[in-house]
């Protein structure tokens, strides 16, 4: 079974070390960051399945980092904070965190919360996978029939084009880099790929589903980052 990657973001090395040991003992692969800026850099490079995010950190704190992450991803986030006031918890959860744990905490309690969040995420992913049809305005993607229609008209997509469109539609609001699209669709983890290959497929999809490909309604370009379909 593939290991789940947990990103631990905390400027306290002792906390990172303790969590690293407990998470590793549960079979998770642990990635560490000392502040929000480093966490955002890691998220652009690595596949992360859950984030443990401290609130009070230098450079970019947990609240700001959470807001940045939620612009692109629905990855589970558990916030850590020494603040116990209800208002602080509300602030943390309102920025998009899935859970909030106050310091000091027992590592086994945090591990239980990690497992609970990953179960919920897997359940949501299972629900998405079992949905046979995705509707986005006048765009309909039927997975079982491998059929796409726009404004009631069938659209002939190649298998690769269909997979790219389905990937973006399944994760609406999440930005996918060219490399991430290549890895997800071609199942190729090697660094040897051509960005032009993905970009040409995106262009072809737009030509087929968009009324005005240069001003796309569905597949949006996030300059310098990648592509997404809006929520």
Image (cartoon, rainbow, N blue to C red):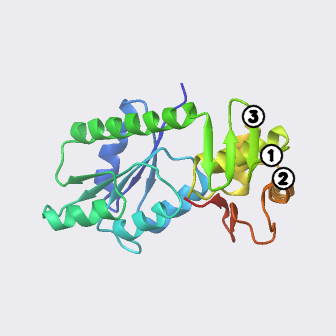
Mark 1 = which residue? Answer: 161
The label shown at residue 175 is none
Mark 2 = which residue? Answer: 201
Residue depicted at x 22% and y 39%: 109
First in sequence: mark 2 vs mark 1: 1
**Within 10 angstroms of label 3, few (less than 14), some, or many (20 or more) residues?**
some
93 w.r.t. 106: above or below: below
Labels 2 & 1 near each other (Cβ < 8 A): yes
First in sequence: mark 1 vs mark 3: 3
Q: In the depicted view, which residue is nearer to us: 33 or 194?
A: 194
Which of pointers 2 and 3 indicates the residue nearer the eye? 3
**Mark 2 to mark 3 CA distance (whole Å):** 17 Å
Local SS, label 2:
helix
Q: Is residue 131 left or right of residue 26?
A: right
Q: Position of residue 101 (x, y in %)?
A: 22, 52
Mark 3 = which residue? Answer: 146
Q: Position of residue 171 (x, y in %)?
A: 57, 49
Q: Quadrant of residue 120?
A: top left
**Within 10 angstroms of label 2, few (less than 14), some, or many (20 or more) residues?**
some
First in sequence: mark 2 vs mark 3: 3
Q: Is residue 24 left or right of residue 190?
A: left
Local SS, label 3:
loop
**Quarter containing the N terminus:** top right
**Within 10 angstroms of label 1, few (less than 14), some, or many (20 or more) residues?**
many
- Furthest-left residue in view? 85
Local SS, label 1:
helix
154 w.r.t. 35: above or below: above
């Amino acid at each position: 079974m593939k290991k789940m990657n947990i990103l631990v973001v905390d400027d306290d090395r002792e906390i990172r070390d303790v969590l690293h040991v407990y998470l590793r003992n549960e079979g998770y692969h642990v990635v560490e960051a000392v502040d929000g800026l480093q966490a955002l850099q890691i998220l652009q490079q690595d596949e992360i399945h859950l984030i443990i995010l401290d609130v009070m950190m230098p450079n970019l704190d947990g609240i700001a980092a959470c807001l940045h992450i939620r612009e692109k991803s629905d990855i589970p986030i558990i916030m850590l904070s020494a603040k116990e006031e209800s208002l602080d918890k509300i602030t943390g959860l309102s920025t998009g965190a899935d859970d909030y744990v106050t310091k000091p905490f027992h590592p086994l309690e945090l591990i239980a919360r990690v497992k609970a969040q990953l179960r919920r995420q897997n359940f949501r992913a299972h629900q998405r996978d079992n949905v046979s049809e995705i509707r986005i305005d006048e765009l309909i993607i039927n997975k079982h029939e491998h059929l796409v229609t726009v404004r009631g008209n069938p659209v002939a997509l190649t298998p690769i084009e269909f997979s790219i469109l389905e990937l973006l539609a399944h994760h609406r609001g999440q930005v996918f880099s060219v490399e991430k699209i290549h890895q997800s669709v071609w199942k190729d983890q090697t660094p040897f790929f051509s960005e032009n290959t993905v970009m040409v497929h995106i262009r072809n999809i737009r030509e087929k589903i968009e009324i005005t490909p240069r001003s796309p309604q569905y597949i949006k370009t996030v300059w310098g980052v990648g592509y997404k379909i809006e929520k």
